[in-house]
Image (cartoon, helix red, strand yellow):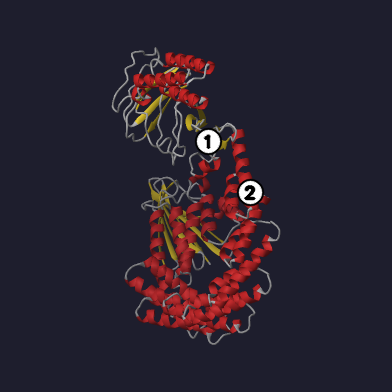
Amino acid sequence: MRGILINCLKFVWRQSEFAFFGALTTVGALFILYLFLEEKNETRIALLLLFAVLLLSCQGSPNEVSQPKPNDVVENNEKPDDIGQEHVSSAEISFVLDRDIYIFKNDFPELYTASIRDINNTISYVQNWKFSDVLNTTNFTNIQWSVSQSTNNAKLVLFQGKCTTVQYNADVMLEFYIQNGAKVPLVWGAKIVTDKETSRVSAQDFLDQGMYWDEAVVMADTTLSCLMLLMSEDAMQSAALYYETLADEFMQNKDYDNAIVYYEKANVVGEKLFAAYYAKAEEFLALDDLNNACTYFSRAGNYKDSFVRLLEVYYKLGQKNEKDNDYIAAIYNYSMAGDYSDARAKYKHCNYKQGELYMNNKQYLDAVICFESAANYVGAAEKYQEACYLYADQQLLIGSTETAAIYFSKIQDYKDAAVRIVRYHYEKGTDYFSSKEYIIAAEHFVLAETYSDACTMVSECYYCYGKQQFELNYISVAIEYLSKCRGYKDTDDILLGYYYGEAQKAYALLLTAYSGKGNSSVRDAYEDAIDILVLCEGYEDSTTLIKIVEKTYYVWQEMQFQSNYAATLYNMIVSCSGSIISIEKSGFLGGYDNLSLTYNLSNNTFSAELTNVLGRTFRDERVICALITLFTDIKDVTDLKNQLSKQNSWIASNEGESFSIKYGGYNIVIQTMKAGYGHVDCIIKVEK
């Protein structure tokens, strides 16, 4: 009877928790209980039951009293100084903790209104507290929140679908976790109590259902039946230890899949994980699942003999592939098997067999690779040569001559491989030449090298193309290609004739430059003339022209300024005929005189006439000696100067005087005469 009474009291307390007269009801119930314990009689029992019924009829159900209807709003006139009340839309929950605002959006099928007070001295007005999914977790069903207003705390009630009965007065622990620099409510833990006994919820159940983040771990306390979330680094270590413990159990039970899963979750790297991989590989191997066995043996690293076992699996895969005539896969797996058993020999055999298949399909390059890999396998060398030959021939047909040449060169002693490529180029060159595509033809003849008259045909191509460009007046291109075949036919005459014509033009520009009327300086005109004359030296009178250019430029340089010989050839007029050079200069001595000089380049003799020279006589040995050294091969004129300076060396005649001497192999004669107005004329002749 006492047990029944206690249960009734529990019921009454639950019903009265949210009622206005809860405290009074409790006092009354305790008083009746006292009476009941003092005297055991049926009347008191009846009174007790009647009193409980009356209380229930007055108060109604707790849900009817404490929970507002959908869309109702609870009035709350109290507002905090700093935050105040905030109405939140039906699509979100907002609450303030440590003055950080957290908002979660979801769909809410029903609407409830409540207030949370005095959580870290802050207040937030909350609306719409019923929702089906919290923090994007899964497998929660019928989750409801209820608030009991108090000055010290806020009580939240969590209904979890797995529990058949959950009391309203459960205390709730809320933990926060700092992630990415912000506080995030990560999960809710609750003490879950049933009518009859403490309920146990397996932590593994929650983990398997994915209710929490991987970095969190839920511990199931078998004594208190409290689900707790550990958030610190210690918690991470605890989580890792928890997963590792689970994995160890799975290993003992030979559940290698789960063992691997939880070792990986625990970030276990080392022998335990490798042992799980190794065991799983053995399991696959026993099932003849070679691909997976290979995968897990490779993951096992250096555990036990995993490396050797891996080679073994590759070898068995190769055998299986070879049996199925899948030689490509067999080649790969035998290559991975390395030196295991006779893997290398089988590798060569499979390459040979695959090469034959490629040959049958006219995949000659692939065949070349396979036969080359088969190395010293019986018959592989001959097959390799044949594959190279056929591949090169195939490349010739599609115009890939460079590739063809490479593969013909690999097998020069096989059949006619040595001449195939050069013959091909010769024939192609002939075709292009017939079409007057001379440059492309020449390229092929060059590649033909010594085949037939390929070298001669190269010259012919350049010759024809050069003449063609001359006719089109593309001179620079014509010169470029004719220069490549010098000595062929009349190529030299064509080039020399062109250069000679250009040299004549350059020489004419030089003569114009001497007179000061040209656009080029004397130095530039001289260099241009010499450069082009050298190209045609020996052609017609080009050699003489070179000498004339050199002589005139030398004379101009030596007598360019008065400071040298008291005479100048600046702005002189030069002309030539054959080997005869004529020079005219006004103001030769700086006055109104004129110089007229004729020089024979062939024998270094000259005659010069100076007219209208100011003075009664002309005996300027410096000028006379300068002309002699410039236009003869006499270099030492010391004695000549002495003779010219002596009075008795000059012979008077009529109105003039004369001077003659044999000097340095030359007959030198100088004759002067009066010209009037205090001027004289002078004639200088130097002959052999």
Question: In this orientation, does residue 431 appear?
Answer: yes
Q: x, y percentage for residue 310?
A: 64, 64
Please, is residue 243 above or below residue 117 in the view? below
Task: Find disc 2 in the rendering and name its residue.
Answer: 249
Is 258 in front, or is 497? 258
Is 182 in front, or is 45? 45
- Which residue occupies 52% across, 82% down? 389
CA separation in Å, label 2 and label 1: 25 Å
Q: Residues within 10 Å of mark 1 (few under 14, many from 20)?
A: some
Q: x, y percentage for residue 660?
A: 53, 60
Mark 2–mark 1 CB contact (< 8 Å): no
Q: Could you tell me the amino acid type at mark 1?
A: Ser
Q: Could you tell me the amino acid type at mark 2?
A: Glu
Q: Quarter of the image holding residue 583?
A: bottom left
- Which residue occupies 61% across, 71% down? 316
Tell me the element at label 2.
Answer: helix
User: Does residue 516 appear to the left or right of 618 in the view shown?
Assistant: left
User: Does residue 386 appear to the left or right of 440 in the view shown?
Assistant: right
Q: x, y percentage for residue 606?
A: 48, 62
Tell me the element at label 1.
Answer: loop
Is 115 in front, or is 431? 115
**Number of on-image labels:** 2
Please, is residue 408 above or below residue 153 in the view? below
- Which residue occupies 34% across, 16% down? 76
Q: x, y percentage for residue 356?
A: 53, 81
Q: Residues within 10 Å of mark 2 (few under 14, many from 20)?
A: some
Which sits earlier in the primary sequence, circle 2 or circle 1? 1
- Disc marking residue 418: none
Is 405 in front, or is 617? 405
- Which residue occupies 67% across, 60% down? 306
Question: In this orientation, does residue 100 appear?
Answer: no
Task: Find disc 1 in the rendering and name its residue.
Answer: 199
